[in-house]
Image (tube, rainbow, N blue to C red):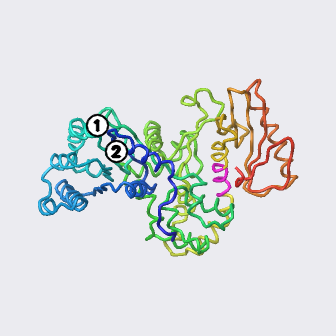
Amino acid sequence: MAEKIFKNRVNELKLLNDLYEKPQAKLIIVYGRRRVGKTELLKEFLKKHKGLYILARQESEAEQIKKISSQIAEYYNDNVLKINPFNNWDALFLYLSEKPRIPIVIDEFPYIIQSAKQVTGILQDYWDNQFSKKNSFLVLCGSSIAMMEKLLGKKSPIYGRRTEQILLEPLKFNDACLFFPDKMSIKDKVIYYSILGGMPAYLLEFDFEKSLRENVMDNIARKNKFLYQDVLFTLREELKEPRNYFSILYSIAKGNSKSGQIVNDTGLEKSFVNKYLSVLIDLQLIERRVPITEKNSARSRNGIYLLRDNFFKFWFKFIFENQEYIEQEKQEKLADEKILPELNAFAGRIFEEVALSEISRSGKYKNYLFGRWWDKSSEVDIVGIDRFNKKILVGEIKFKKLTKAEVQEIKRSLEENAKKINLLGFEQKLIIVCLDCDYEDSEVEIVCLDKI
């Protein structure tokens, strides 16, 4: 298992530091999926500023107040408070509002709301009349995306009080690579990323001194392991009807990308499926994608639904579909018969997402809007459109080292597909993204992933 130290999150950490240095009251909402690294980010921020960290738990209101009183007393070395905890939230917030300015982080804030719904109204009162007048710096953090987004809504008592909100997302490929050994090849990094994705907690579970086969068998394909259980745990934590949502996620994982296909596969009513799909998008578990050239993406009939998280994709394809191997403790057989033979093809599809993301973040193409394009008969991996300068980039992605002959064949295919993308008057350019290539061609740009 990798050493559990703080890695990356440079931009988010800088944002928090910059906000704290401004002599103004700040009420900041930090939220995101479980395992994405919110707590570690906030603790790293607090190391520099010596702030107060409060962790809420799933327990009764009285126990919440007692436990939080203890954390506050420990921070301020308040012996009286250690013996006599607060009796209510008013006393707790009043105490904090009278202290000198420091960063105050309340982690897992939704747990407090679950046991004391009135707490947001009380906090609103103290924010308006105490904290905001003393330039306080308060961070509310939570892993329940649904509940945290309610805090941002118009019906919430603290609506309009927040000064910033930070949605912490999974790490992109280049950022996730900080968890891998430097000596690891770019191909192996893509394969590991295709399995674990960008969740720091997942990336820390693998021991990179061991083989990939050993890691998968020992850390995912065993029922008592964190990585085996976390997909189901995430759904149970976030959703009231996890069974129906699970059916939809599994259907999408099998390749049913249209709402009609999902309805037919799951047997659920269309109205329910559409509602569930919307919730899963809000929870960042799936995404709806349309061809990049669509003018009205919200109404497009060409929209498809895809899983967002690499680990969810891996878990549904290789773990959930092969439960009998795990039930009978045939992990080696599972790895050798089901996972390893298909892993390169699986990673190749993830590589397409990685390459598209990295190209879109490249400074060379900062004026381009990137996506994919498809119709009933054709699909293009990369389409970048610069509408201001009337330029279009059309490309293909290959998870391999390309030969001259392969480049020539891909180029011919791209030229045919480029004719189908109807943007009149746009200057077209062809691009191929691959793992490696020794050949150069004046008519097509060839980019290796590690050179982007």
| Real-space CA distance between mark 1 and mark 2, rounded to the nearest whole angstrom | 13 Å
Q: Is residue 226 left or right of residue 359?
A: left
The residue lying furthest to the top in this view is 425
Name the one closer to the observer, 376 or 224.
224
Q: Is residue 409 left or right of residue 248?
A: right
The amino acid sitting under disc 2 is: Met
Question: Where is residue 47 shown, x and y percent of the image?
Answer: 39, 58
Is residue 149 inside the magenta stretch? no
The amino acid sitting under disc 1 is: Ile
Question: Where is residue 296 shown, x and y percent of the image?
Answer: 58, 27
Residue at image point 53% right, 60% down: 315
Name the one closer to the observer, 374 or 444.
444
Name the one closer to the observer, 197 or 124.
124
Foreground label between 1 and 2: 1
Mark 1: secondary structure = loop
Segment tinted magenta in the rendering: 346-354
Mark 2 is surrounded, within 10 Å at the Cα level, by few (under 14), some (14 to 19) or many (20 or more) other residues, namely: some
Q: Is residue 294 left or right of residue 15?
A: right
**Residue 391, placed above or below residue 6:** above
The numbered mark at residue 147 is 2
Residue at image point 44% right, 63% down: 229
Considering only order in the chain, which callout, 2 or 1, is on the residue closer to the N terminus?
Answer: 2
How would you classify the magenta stretch by its main secondary structure? helix
Residue at image point 68% right, 27% down: 387
**Residue 177, placed above or below residue 21:** below
Residue at image point 64% right, 42% down: 360
Question: Where is residue 252 shown, x and y percent of the image?
Answer: 55, 48
The numbered mark at residue 158 is 1
**Residue 43, placed above or below residue 267:** below
Question: Where is residue 392 shown, x and y percent of the image?
Answer: 73, 33
